Every structure is written in C-alpha cells, then in structure tokens.
Image (spheres, rainbow, N blue to C red):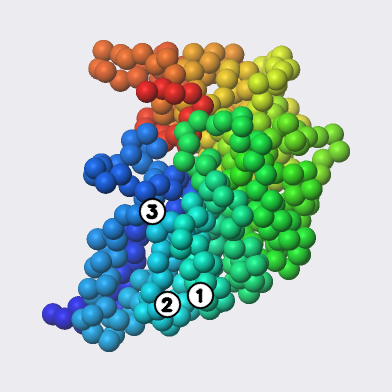
Amino acid sequence: MSFDALPPEVIFDILEHLYQEQNAPIIGQKAAWTRMLPKPEESTEPDERSNGNTFYTNSEHSAGYLALLALRRTSRYLNDLCMPLIFRDYHLFTSHWHPVEGKLSILRTYAKHIRNIRLVANTPTTYTREYEYIISTVLPLCTNAISLSLYYDQNLDILPMKESLALLKCGTIQSFGIYSMVILNQEIGNPTWEDKKPALAYELLNKLAQDTGLVSNLRILDIVMETLPTKTYELIQTRALSLQSYTIRRAFRSTILDRIWVRHNRWMPNDNLTCLRLIDCSNAYAPHIPYLVQHFNSLRELMVSTCGDNDDVDPKTSRKNGWSKELGALCNVHRPLDTFHIENMIEWEIYELGVIPAVEVIVTLVNGEHLKRCLVRDAEIFPGVRVLHLGEVRGATKDDHGEDNWYGLPLICQQMGIEIRRGAKRVRRRYNME
C-alpha cells in the first residue's frame, strides 16, 4: 500500500512524531535551562552534567528530520505536507553560518512556513556581516512565526534589535525569550556576571514593554539575563498583563532591585498567568513567594529554584496546629497549584514556602534532613499535597536495597498520606556535587 493511501490523520500523526525528534529548546518549557553548546567531536554520549538538557549547535540533523526530507521526495502530496514541518524551526548561529545564495533562495521561498526562530549571536566571526544580511533578508518574510528566541554570548553588541522588533510588530509572535549563553552554559552562578550590562537587550525589552500593542500579543516570556535595570523590571511588572507563562532566570538581583514583593506592590493583577518560574533570583525572598501566589489567582505551576540572597533572614515563623483551616490561609483563598517545584532551598525557606497549596510537590537538590524536619514540624505543610516527587539530594544515604533513604521520608510521607515518586529532574546546581 502506498504511503499516500493512508488516512490523512494517520499521516499527520506520523509526520508530527518525526518532527518532535528534533528536540530543540522551547520557550516556556526547558529553554531557560538548556545549554547551547557545540558538541565535542570525540563525544557520542549525552552530557550527563546538564541532566540531558543540552542543545548542540553543530549537531547533525535528527533521524526524524532526515526522514521528513526523504518522504517529501516521494510525491507531490507528501512534499506539500512535509515542507511546513521541515521549515517550522529556523536556527541561525553567527559562529558557523556561511550563507550561500542557493540556501537564501530556499529560505525566501519557505519563510512563510517558519514558526519558531532561534537567533544565536555568539562569538563574532568573519561571517558576522553575512549573519546580519541573512537576518535582514529572511526575518521580514517570516510573517507566520509564533516564537522568537534571541541568544547572546560574550559580545553584547550584535543582537538584531531592529529586525526583532519589526517581527514582533507583525503581531503573530506569542512566545519571546532572550537568553544569555554565559548563564545557560554554566552550571553554577558567578557574582561577576552582575558587572555585565547587555544594553541592547535592555533596550529591546524596554521597547517591547512600553508598546502596549506588542506586549499584549505575548503569552509566554523567558528572560535569562545577568541583571535587569529597575526601569525594565517595573515595566514588565506593570505592562506584561497578557502573559500565561513567565520564566525568569538570574535577572532579578537583590543588589539592584527591591525584593520581589514590597510593601507598595508594583505587580499588576494578571488573571492569565498560570505558570511562574523563578530561577536563581536573589531578590525572591522565600517568605514573599506566597504573596505572589495569592496575587496571581490563576497560577497553576510554580518553580522556585536557587532563589534568595545570602543576607536573607529567617523570620522564625511558627505555625500552630490547624492553621490551614483558618479563613485567611492561602489554601482557602487560592486553589492548589498543580505542581510546585522547589530546588536548592534551605530548611527555613522550605518551611516558609510550605503554606503554598499544591497537589504535586517536586523537590530537587535539597538537604534531605531539612525536608524531613519541615514535614515533621508541620503536618499541614503544602496543603492538598498528594504526591511528593524526589530527585537528587545532598547528603543522601542508601537503604539495604541501594535506594536513596532520604532520612526516613518514605515512612513519614506514608503516615501523612503522601505518595512518593523518585526520579525528579533538576534544573540547575548551586554546588558542585560530582
């Protein structure tokens, strides 16, 4: 039987499966913690240090992509079905792109099929002018693109700001991300990063936030940057009101900004926001996170990873038995989150976050004894929790079966009626654990 004779829905399922194998970082999902690196020539194995979250900028096309290329050659019908998938993702790197007029011609022809654009302004080379030329040539034709990712490296002066703003003004871009490759490619943060001032990135975000029409089109926003000026921070707090997913890594620094929730709160209400991820944000003081959850009343997913500052003070909070039944308790004014991921947080911070209601709590890279003491201290912690997902733990011991003992957590959770599931994936490290 000819492939063409299959029912259209079956063909579409097959083609979508082949497309999914490309494994490129997606804004609002893993893009904020996926490393962008050239694959070492001698390496054929996944990079274990990055927990499998690495996108190789010089890798060969995936088997799925090659299969799509082969299928499109079999008939005109399949060509018409495959081409939109083949050109759905467009990656451009300054470090290894040498445009050929033939390739430009193909890109011009199929630019209408491009949906996801990733522009990587990494180390400047002799091809920088060609990079700028192809951006100015192809980007204006990508009128159906729905996501735009901008990556910058050590050189902060070659971001395609003009072309990016023009593309955003088309009104089709719903997902936007701007990423520092220095941050993405390092497992552990560095205080000297705060000396970097990516002026073009600041200017781009300011122009985006100041234009009500532009920012109202966005549904997903990722910001992975060394710092964020107060002006840009306040613009995002007060203007980005259509966002459904918001991921911030590193950019919220306590040395520059107020704590994430201040007495005269600047965050405007946003009933659309369902996903908030805070990664390595030093102004995200743990006792303030519940206020954010209450403020965003549609929130369904929360991540707090490696947040807080070394100078943060434990408020010495103590909750009495029955606190979760009180009328003003967060669990009685906000429905439980679907998932709450806690990573690289210490005991008093976990305890403070424990007033947040959630159906599933994910815990990675914490001290097992800290988590145990929090559960023992407060039997009502994380109201509504049914499943506790456990990942890597600092100081874990092994039981007789070679499994992580987690300081007796399985028994404690059993008594609390909480199911334990192992194998939770981490996002980033605070300490070297190798």
The residue lying at 28 percent from left, 70 percent from top is 68
Residue reaching furthest to the front: 126
The mark nearer the N terminus, 2 or 3, is: 3
Give the numbered dot on residue 104.
2
Asked whether residue 116 appears in the rendered view, the answer is: no
Q: Nearer the viewer, residue 317 or 225?
A: 225
Image coords of residue 402 (percent x, y) = 26, 18
| Left or right for 295, reference 243 | right
**From the viewer's perspective, is residue 100 above or below residue 278?**
below
Q: Which residue is mark 3?
A: 57
Q: Does the residue at mark 2 contact the one at mark 3 (Cβ under 8 Å)?
A: no
Alpha-carbon distance for marks 1 and 3?
20 Å
**From the viewer's perspective, is residue 37 above or below residue 240?**
above
Q: Amino acid at mark 1?
A: Val
Image coords of residue 340 (percent x, y) = 55, 36
Q: Nearer the viewer, residue 262 or 189?
A: 189
The mark nearer the N terminus, 1 or 3, is: 3
Image coords of residue 216 (percent x, y) = 70, 64
Q: Amino acid at mark 3?
A: Thr
